[in-house]
Structure formats: structure tokens, C-alpha cells
Amino acid sequence: MESITKNRQSATALRAMIGRAYGADRIPEGEGWAAELGNGWFNVAYRIRLRDGAEVVVKVAPPPRVEVMTYEREAMPTELRTLDLLRTHTSVPVPAVDFADRSREVCDADYFFMPYIDGDNLGVIAKQLPAAERDALMEQVGAANREINSVRGQGFGPLAGPGDPSWRRVFTGMVEDVLADGERRGVDLGWDYDTVRATLAAHAGSLDEVTEPRLVEWDLWAGNVMVRDGRIAAVIDHERAFFGDPLIESGFAGTQMADFGHAVPFMRGYGHPELTGTQQVRRRLYCLYLVLIMVIETVFRGHTDSKQYDWARVRLDEAMALFGHVRR
């Protein structure tokens, strides 16, 4: 995926980063030792073959001169905190962190190295799989997501804190940040921004049912799952995690909007019963939040075509229709 947030590095810079992480004796020589991994939307990542043949991945945060959305600030420190929490408190397979550097001495942004995960990206291969095999893997994703959500926080909000006891206050603030980003950059939603705000306010009472902060990935879709031999090999890309309501996880999105996929296998693996009325309202608010981001981020990422924007605009109409609003 192409985005101006991808902070591509020269071979010289990559060698300097490798030397800092693994030592001068493991810096690769010659050609063909680095290849960009193309599935990501935000950070740039390279598959690196070290001089001794070991394969690793380096992930580099966006360049400091590029404006990102408010919720994307400090994304790499968030990912590192999430990886530590998951390795410490769960059995969910995640990459190890070999080395992380925030000094900006050899690279203009944060970066970290991890071992290369040998496996297939579920988001890439899902359509090629028999339905039963695909559903079985999504059940595993649901079970893993439930284990991730078992990690409790001291308050709602960013992993770095300080934490807030009110999920309503935190979530409505998250939506306001996204709307403010869109207004600042003049993004056309097809809806008046204040109409969206009023919709959120009218249904915000459903958020008060959530009283216990849980670790949520938010971005745990098939494209962030690596599989091998019919099992999850690793869950990747943890930069959007926070303490919130588990129902905001992407695996539940299909319960309200069919274009986000069939939720039944995920929910079966998760062990979640059919959503109650209040839960459905919350999930619709979370769908609204997601599609607002999908519309607005196209401007921040400098998309050169309107494919995602057009698709997300239709989804935004559908999300507003869930609350009885029809665009005229």
C-alpha cells in the first residue's frame, strides 16, 4: 500500500540501523539483502537478511515532517508497550523485539527490529482457502482476541496513561479527535460534522455500560494475522492498542455492517453470545468511528486515487443509516 507516512530508508541508513541493533559483524554485504514488505498501510517495514543468514524485519515509524492523525501519534511506543503486555500476560504468539531505538541518531524516526515470521498473511490468502479452513482460522483469531482482552487496565485510554474511569468520556474524545482532524484538513464526509457529533451524543449513554478497562487491539483483522500449518503463527501490528471496550475489536464489526466480514466464526471462537440491544448500539458507534477514520485518513496519507475514499464514504452512509439518518 502506498502512503506518505511510509518512511523509506536508504541502504546506507539500513546498514547503520542493523549495525546498531546486531553489531557490525552482522551487517549484510552485497545486494538483495533488503526487501520492502508491501502489505502495511502506515509504517514501512523491510525484510532483512543479515550477514549470517538470519532473517529479521525492521519497522520504521513515519517521518517527523509528515502530519499523522491525532490517534496515530506515538504509535510505535504503543506497539512496543502492547508487545510487552502480550508477552507478559498472554500466550498469544507475537514477535519478539530484538532492538528498539528512539534516539533519532541513525534514523529520523523510531524503529525496531524483530525476527521474521515465516508464515502466510491471512488477509492475503483468506479468499483462496476453503470456507471451513478459513472459518477455523477465524475462530482461532476470536479465541486469541479474547485472551488479549483479558488483560485489565487501570483506566480507559492510551496505554501510556494516565487513564480515565469513564469509557464514555474517552470514546467520545476519540471520535472528537478524528472529527477535528477531518475539519482541520477540510475532508468532505458527505455529512455535516455537527450532525455526526449529534448522532454520537444521542447514543453515548450506551457507553456507560462499560466499566472495566480491557486491552484492545482495535486493528486485529485478518491482515494482521500470520498463519502456518493451519494455526496462528503470530499476531502483528499492535500500534493502535488502548484500554477500552472489547466490543470495539474489528472482529465484531460484521455484526452491524456486512462489508466488514462475516462475524460468526470470530464470535464462536471468542465465545461471545449474540449482542444485546445496548451492545448493538455501542458496536454501531464503533463502526461509525472506524469509517470516519477510513474516510479522513485518505487525506492524511496522501492517497493518489479515490478508491478507499469512495468505498469508505459509502460505508459512512451505511453507518449513519444504522442510526436512522439518510443522506438526501
Image (tube, rainbow, N blue to C red):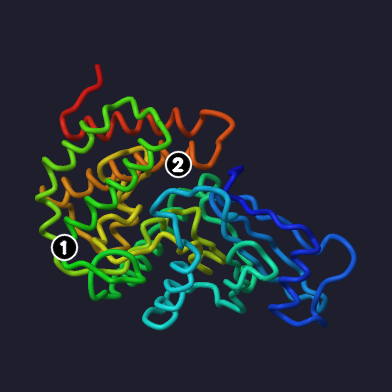
The percent coordinates of residue 60 (x first, y second) are: 61, 61
Could you say which quadrant of the image residue 296 lies in?
A: top left
Above or below — where is 243 with respect to 88?
Answer: above
Task: Give neighbour class at mark 2: few <14, some 14-19, many 20+ (Cα, 10 Å).
Answer: many
Q: Nearer the viewer, residue 10 or 311?
A: 10
Horizontally, is 130 left or right of 272 in the view? right
Element on which disc 2 rests: helix
Q: Quadrant of the N terminus?
A: top right
Above or below — where is 108 with respect to 4?
Answer: below
Q: Nearer the viewer, residue 275 or 22?
A: 22
The percent coordinates of residue 98 (x first, y second) are: 61, 79
Query: Which residue in the rendered view is the most extreme toward the top?
Result: 328
Q: Earlier in the sequence, mark 1 or mark 2?
A: 1
Horizontally, is 284 left or right of 18 in the view? left
Task: Give neighbour class at mark 1: few <14, some 14-19, many 20+ (Cα, 10 Å).
Answer: some
Taking the spot 71% from the left edge, 71% from the top edge, the residue there is 17
Horizontally, is 54 left or right of 42 in the view? right
- Is the Cβ of the residue at disc 1 closer than 8 Å to that at disc 2? no
As shown in the figure, which amino acid type bears the numbered disc 2?
A: Glu
Could you say which quadrant of the image residue 255 lies in?
A: top left
Which residue does the numbered mark 1 point to in the structure image? 166
Taking the spot 57% from the left edge, 71% from the top edge, the residue there is 102
Could you say which quadrant of the image residue 108 lies in?
A: bottom right
Taking the spot 61% from the left edge, 42% from the top edge, the residue there is 2
Query: Which residue in the rendered view is the most extreme toward the right?
Result: 30
Horizontally, is 7 left or right of 14 in the view? left
As shown in the figure, which amino acid type bears the numbered disc 1?
A: Ser
Which residue does the numbered mark 2 point to in the structure image? 297
Taking the spot 25% from the left edge, 57% from the top edge, the residue there is 247
Q: Could you give the CA–CA distance between mark 1 and mark 2, rounded to whole angstroms?
A: 27 Å
The percent coordinates of residue 248 (x first, y second) are: 28, 55
